[in-house]
Structure formats: C-alpha cells, structure tokens
Amino acid sequence: MKQLFASALLAVASLAAPAEDVFTGLPTADPFNSATYSGYLTVSETKALHYVFAESYNNPTTDPIIIWFNGGPGCSSLLGFMQENGPRMVNDGEVFIEDNPYPWNSRANVLWLESPAGVGWSYAGTEQDL
C-alpha cells in the first residue's frame, strides 16, 4: 500500500498535470473553479488506474494533497468525487449536477484514485492484475 501512495504522488508530480488530461466541466454544470484533470496512471503494461485530480481553490502550489479511495474493494472513487467531497455533486434522487458548497479542494489539492484495477474506469488486462 505504501508503494501505491508513493507511486501516485510521484506520478502526479512527475506528470505535472498533462494538458491532455484537463477537463473543464461536466454537462449542464458550471465550469470547474480550478484546474481539474482526468486520466490514467499506468501501473504496468496491462494495468492502469483512473484518476481525477482537482487543484486547490486556495493555493495549489503550497496546499497539501489529499488522496481519496472509496471503500471496497469494488467501489469507484468517483462516488466520492460526485456525491461526497468533489467540486460538483449529484444528490440522491436528483438528476442534475450542482455546485458542492464545501468541496475538499477548497483548501487542498485532491486526487481521487479508482482502485484496485478493474474498479470504475480503472482497468486490468489480466486476472493477475485484479
């Protein structure tokens, strides 16, 4: 588990938020208030973990990084991103996206990581990758 944390931090830092992973908003919702990225962290030739990274509203260069994993295994971290602590949310029973008045990225950079491979948009090419 320590290797996963270290790998995630190094990947985010070394990738320097690649331009091809930028996304500015979600359909029918206001644009994000800070730089937000969605992409993959390559773990091996056959395994990659999907991530969403939102920069802090406050000071992204000095604010801490929070890494969010939903419980599981088997629960996508996008549940946390879209219903618990991300900048936009869909409330239970609703069909529209709205601003979250208390997103965690108001004072920290947040990395939502879908793991293990095979959960959410993360993928595993072989049974051994799961």
Image: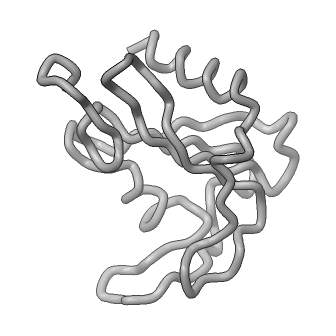
Percent across and percent down for residue 29 are 60, 83
Q: As displayed, is residue 75 above or below residue 67?
A: below
The residue lying at 42 percent from left, 67 percent from top is 83
Viewer-closest of 109 and 31: 31
The residue lying at 57 percent from left, 71 percent from top is 88
Viewer-closest of 29 and 100: 29
- Quarter of the image for the N terminus: give it: top left
Q: In this view, which residue lies farthest toward the top?
A: 3
Q: Is residue 4 left or right of residue 101?
A: left
The residue lying at 24 percent from left, 38 percent from top is 118
Viewer-closest of 71 and 41: 41
The residue lying at 73 percent from left, 49 percent from top is 55
Percent across and percent down for residue 51 are 50, 42
Model colouring: one colour
Q: As displayed, is residue 100 above or below residue 52?
A: below
- Quarter of the image for the C terminus: give it: top left
Q: Disc count in the image?
A: 0
Q: Is residue 56 left or right of residue 50?
A: right
Q: As displayed, is residue 96 above or below residue 25?
A: below
Location of residue 43 by image quarter = top left
Q: Is residue 31 left or right of residue 123?
A: right
Location of residue 95 by image quarter = bottom left
Q: As displayed, is residue 21 above or below residue 8?
A: below
Percent across and percent down for residue 17 are 72, 38
